[in-house]
Amino acid sequence: MALKPNAGTCWIREQTIEDLPSGLTLRLVASERGARLVLAGRVLPNGNREIVFDADGSAVAVGPLLKKLHL
């Protein structure tokens, strides 16, 4: 996915967000190489998903969650 022209940056804390009405859980996890956003919930027809970001904030991988999600 391309970055927006003149895109800004922001800081987001690691956290787990449960959206009860939709049945989704979002988890933000940081590492020295970048970050992961995990989308989990029974409402996802193809299973849990994750988006991996590099240290510059660019999305580098999108796909099924390969590790078990521990809430």
Image (tube, rainbow, N blue to C red):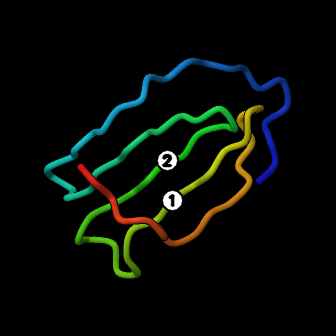
Residue 47: image location, x then y, percent = 37, 76
**Mark 2 element type:** strand
Q: Is 53 above or below relative to 62?
A: above
Q: Closer to the camera, 69 or 25?
A: 69
Q: Residue at x 62, y 63 (%)?
A: 62
Kind of residue indicated by mark 1: Glu
Relative image position of residue 11 (x, y in whole percent): 55, 18
Q: Which mark is residue 62?
A: none
Determine the residue positioned at 35% across, 32% down: 15
Q: Earlier in the sequence, mark 2 or mark 1?
A: 2
Task: Please name whichever residue, 11 or 21, is drawn nearer the observer in this view of the structure.
Answer: 11
> In this rendering, is residue 61 above or below 8?
below
Which residue is at the far right?
5
Q: Amino acid at mark 2?
A: Leu
Local SS, label 1: strand
Residue 35 rendering spot, x and y as whole percentages = 59, 39
Quadrant of the frame with the N terminus: bottom right
Residue located 38% across and 44% down the image: 27
Q: From the viewer's perspective, is 58 left or right of 42? A: right
Residue 30 point in image, percent of width and height: 53, 34
Q: Nearer the viewer, residue 16 or 21?
A: 16
State left or right for residue 41 relative to residue 54: left
Q: State the CA–CA distance, disc 2 to disc 1.
A: 6 Å
Residue at x 27% of width, y 54% of height = 70
How many neighbours does mark 2 have within 10 angstroms: few (below 14), some (14-19), or many (20 or more)? some
The single residue placed furthest to the left in the displayed view is: 20
Mark 2 — residue? 37
Disc marking residue 50: 1
